[in-house]
Amino acid sequence: MHKSRLGTVIIDCETDDLDSEARFWSAALGGEVVSSRTGGRYIDLRSDPADPHVILQRVEHPSRIHIDIETDDIEAEVKRLQGLGATVVEIMERWTVMEAPSKHRFCIIGARRDGFDEKANVWD
């Protein structure tokens, strides 16, 4: 048995000015810019704690949005999603990149948000 839920919405930005993108998205979503990490590659936005985490990420590919599914067992969640038709794109040290049958990319990450144990879906 393991648990998972939508954890993060990642706004991939092909830009040289991630701060400007963060100002736009924080105003658009009603959030607040709270931190910049990893040499300016990521910016966190804060909103209602019940909402998924929102992160802006500087990328080299065209801008898009992807999601992170947080789980207490990455391997079990990857297997569950493979059973639904997803494929593994790349296994990283702390997450796994997957692709849905629709070709949308998403990541499986460890549980991070508060309330995970109480709010996550339980899978056999």
Image (spheres, rainbow, N blue to C red):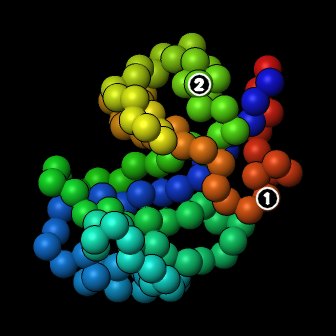
Q: Residues within 10 Å of mark 1 (few under 14, many from 20)?
A: few
Mark closest to the chain's N terminus, 2 or 1:
2
Residue type at the position of mark 2: Glu
Q: Are marks 2 and 1 in contact (CB under 8 Å)?
A: no
Residue 21: percent from left, percent from top: 28, 77
- Picture coordinates of residue 118, whole percent (x, y): 85, 51
Dot 2 corresponds to which residue? 75
Q: Position of residue 90 (x, y in %)?
A: 34, 29
Q: Residue furthest top?
A: 83
> Relative to 8, is 44 above or below?
below
Q: Is residue 6 above or below residue 9?
A: above
Spot the residue most to the right.
118
Measure the C-alpha gap from mark 2 to mark 1. 21 Å
Q: Does residue 73 appear to the left or right of 93 in the view shown?
A: right
Would you say residue 86 is visible in this rendering?
Answer: yes
Is residue 99 in sight in this rendering?
A: no
Badge 2 density bin: few <14, some 14–19, many ≥20, Cα 10 Å: few
Query: Residue 14 sits in which quadrant?
Result: bottom left
| 56 relative position to 20: left or right | right
Q: Position of residue 16 (x, y in %)?
A: 14, 73
Left or right placement of residue 40 versus residue 114 in this view: left
Query: Residue drawn at (55%, 78%), measured in percent from left and top?
Result: 46
Residue at the spot x=49%, y=66% of the render?
54
**Secondary-structure class at tag 2:** helix
48 up-or-down from 76: above or below: below
Q: Amino acid at mark 1?
A: Gly
Q: In the picture, which quadrant includes the N terminus?
A: top right
Residue drawn at point x = 25 percent, y = 83 percent: 20
Considering the image in quadrants, where does the C terminus appear? Answer: top right
- Quickly name the residue at label 1: 115
Quick one: SS at disc 1?
Answer: loop
User: Is residue 70 positioned above or below 85 on the image?
Assistant: below
